[in-house]
Image (cartoon, rainbow, N blue to C red):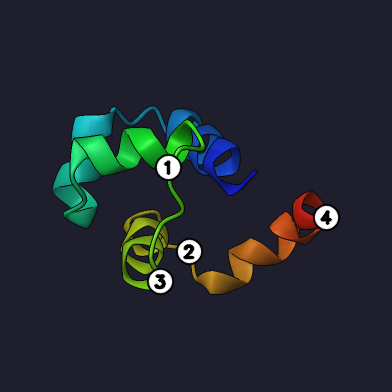
Amino acid sequence: MIGQRLLRLRSSKGWSIRDLQREADISPAMISRVERGLSMPSYDVLGRWLKAFGLGFSWLDGCQHEYA
């Protein structure tokens, strides 16, 4: 699930939800919902999320097997 991968990404960098909120301008509630699999991020939110970590959408290539 993409939310789990995004959570692992954030955790691996040692960032709190508040850190990501500041860097990506995403609400803490949205971050939490996505990471728990309760919501799917919009294209815009996902783009800001990945950009905050210096990543592009190509990072999602590793998610393909999770939707098979």
Q: Secondary structure at mark 3?
A: helix
Disc nearer the start of the sequence (1/4):
1
Which amino acid is tagged 4?
Answer: His
- The relative height of residue 16 versus residue 50 in the rendered view (above or below) is above
Q: Residues within 10 Å of mark 2 (few under 14, many from 20)?
A: few
Q: Which mark is residue 34?
A: 1
Image quadrant where residue 65 sits: bottom right
Which amino acid is tagged 3?
Answer: Tyr
Task: Depth check: give the residue in front, 37 or 9.
Answer: 37
Residue beneath the point at 46% across and 36% down: 35
Q: Secondary structure at mark 2?
A: loop
CB within 8 Å, label 4 to label 2? no
- The relative height of residue 18 versus residue 41 in the rendered view (above or below) is above
Could you tell me residue 57's position as x and y percent? 54, 72
Q: Residues within 10 Å of mark 1 (few under 14, many from 20)?
A: many
Q: Which mark is residue 65?
A: 4
Residue at mark 1 to residue at mark 4: CA–CA distance:
19 Å
Residue at mark 2 to residue at mark 3: CA–CA distance:
14 Å
Judge left or right: residue 52 versus residue 39: left
| Tag nearer the camera, 4 or 2 | 4
Quarter of the picture holding the C terminus: bottom right
CB within 8 Å, label 1 to label 2? no
Which amino acid is tagged 1?
Answer: Val
Could you tell me residue 36's position as x and y percent? 47, 31
Q: Which mark is residue 55?
A: 2
Residue carrying label 3: 43
Residue at mark 3 to residue at mark 1: CA–CA distance:
13 Å
| Tag nearer the camera, 2 or 3 | 3
Quarter of the picture holding the N terminus: top right
CB within 8 Å, label 3 to label 1? no
Task: Depth check: give the residue in front, 15 or 44.
Answer: 44
Judge left or right: residue 51 versus residue 18: right
